[in-house]
Amino acid sequence: FSQGAAFVQELAMYDPTLFRAVASGSSYYSASLPELFRAARVRFYCATARNDQGIYEQGHRTGRILSLICPDSRYGEYEKRGHFFIEPRDKTGRGGETFIDWLSKALRK
């Protein structure tokens, strides 16, 4: 999460062949369009919180776009969770799917 989340997103966009799936909580990384499209084959699980001041404003756009253009990707947004890391039982809001459910599916594909 945090700086580590930003780094893993940036690295996955630099060389998507290194990753099958990426999970990032509270990332502040704001990717360019070429970076986003370069990572379009990687599965992303991104989560931010609206009350994570300074982080949300920079990072929520990247998470939202990745969830739309990358296969089987998810974006979760919390109202009041602050600066956080993804926990195994976190849910994306899709039929009760947890992060662990998503991860196990993403790694099998």
Image (cartoon, rainbow, N blue to C red):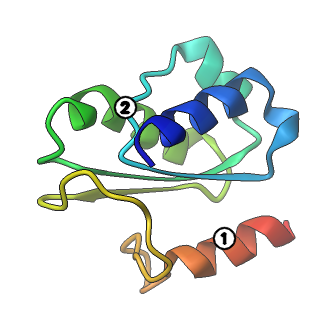
Identify the residue at horizontal 62%, vertical 38% (top origin): 8
Q: Identify the disc placed on residue 10.
A: none
Q: Amino acid at mark 2?
A: Tyr
Compared across the picture, whether 51 is left or right of 18 comes to left
Residue 48 placed where, x, y %?
A: 31, 50
Residue, x 70% and y 35% (percent of image)? 40
Q: Secondary structure at mark 1?
A: helix
Residue neighbourhood size for the residue with mark 2, other residues' Cα within 10 Å, grouped as few (<14), some (14–19), many (≥20): many
Badge 1 amino acid:
Leu
Quarter assignment of residue 28: top left
Relative to residue 51, is residue 61 depicted above or below?
above
Whichever of labels 1 and 2 marks the residue nearer the N terminus, that label is 2
| Residue 70, x across and y down, in percent | 64, 44
Label disc, if present, on residue 28 of the rendered structure: 2
The numbered disc on residue 103 is: 1
Label 1, label 2: how far apart the Cα atoms are: 22 Å
Label 1 crowd (10 A; few <14 / some 14-19 / many >=20): some
Secondary element at image label 2 = loop
Snapshot quadrant of residue 47: bottom left
